[in-house]
Image: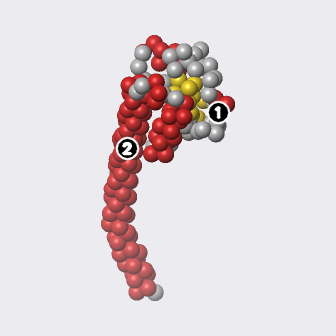
């Protein structure tokens, strides 16, 4: 009986002695994994923001180039059909825009990228906030136009 008691006592002691380093090393590993995961998440967030900024700058540059092209072109190239073709080309090359519009200095929509959606042509948007910002700045601006709670379009003047 004494031998059995000592044997169980030694077994428990060795088990405890073996568990202590495992628990210490395990805690250390969990701490390292948590730190690495947090660092990786932060890097992913920063990369996503930088990528988003790069895409936004790319879109802005493309639209500014289109706006400069339209402004510098002759009146014969500013027809609704010509503008629609230019906007469609921009829409095809730059995914992500749900609506691209050309608005004249009077606040009237002259063209849209979607030729089938002719109902917006001639719409008066001069009293809208984004049109006033364009007229005040006297230069191209990219603005967000909320048509409904579910659809977001971008307006370019």
Q: Left of 44 or right of it: where is 101?
A: right
Q: Could you say where residue 106 lies in the image, as x and y percent from the top left?
A: 54, 15
Residue 94 versus residue 66 in the image, above or below:
below
Residue 91 image offset from top left, x and y in percent: 50, 41
Res. 155 visible in picture: no
Q: Nearer the viewer, residue 66 or 146?
A: 66
Residue drawn at x 64%, y 36% is 117
Q: Secondary structure at mark 1?
A: helix
Q: Are marks 1 and 2 in contact (CB under 8 Å)?
A: no
What secondary structure is found at the residue carrying circle 2?
helix
Q: Position of residue 71 (x, y in %)?
A: 41, 24
Is residue 34 at all visible to an observer of this figure?
yes
Closest to the observer, 48 or 99: 99
Instruction: Name the residue that disc number 2 marks.
Output: 51
Q: Which mark is residue 53?
A: none
Q: Residue at x 52, y 29 (%)?
A: 79
Looking at the image, residue 107 lies above or below residue 142: above
Q: Residue 99's quadrant in the figure?
A: top right
Pinpoint residue 49: horizontal percent, then vertical percent: 39, 40
User: On the image, which quarter does residue 122 sit in?
Assistant: top right
Of circles 1 and 2, the one toward us is 1
Find disc 1 in the rendering and name its residue: 118
**CA separation, marks 1 and 2?**
34 Å
Q: Residue at x 40, y 83 (%)?
A: 7
Question: What residue is rendered at 56% in x and 18% in y?
Answer: 107
Model colouring: secondary structure
């Amino acid at each position: 009986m004494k031998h059995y008691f000592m044997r169980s006592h030694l077994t428990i002691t060795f088990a405890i002695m073996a568990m202590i380093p495992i628990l210490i090393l395990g805690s250390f590993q969990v701490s390292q994994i948590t730190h690495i995961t947090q660092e990786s998440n932060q890097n992913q967030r920063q990369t996503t923001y930088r990528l988003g900024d790069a895409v936004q700058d790319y879109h802005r540059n493309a639209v500014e180039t289109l706006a400069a092209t339209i402004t510098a072109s002759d009146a014969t190239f500013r027809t609704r059909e010509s503008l629609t073709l230019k906007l469609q080309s921009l829409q095809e090359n730059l995914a992500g825009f749900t609506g691209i519009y050309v608005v004249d200095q009077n606040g009237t929509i002259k063209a849209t990228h979607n030729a089938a959606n002719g109902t917006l042509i001639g719409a008066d948007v001069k009293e809208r906030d984004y049109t006033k910002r364009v007229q005040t700045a006297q230069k191209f601006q990219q603005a967000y136009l909320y048509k409904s709670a579910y659809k977001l379009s971008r307006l370019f003047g």
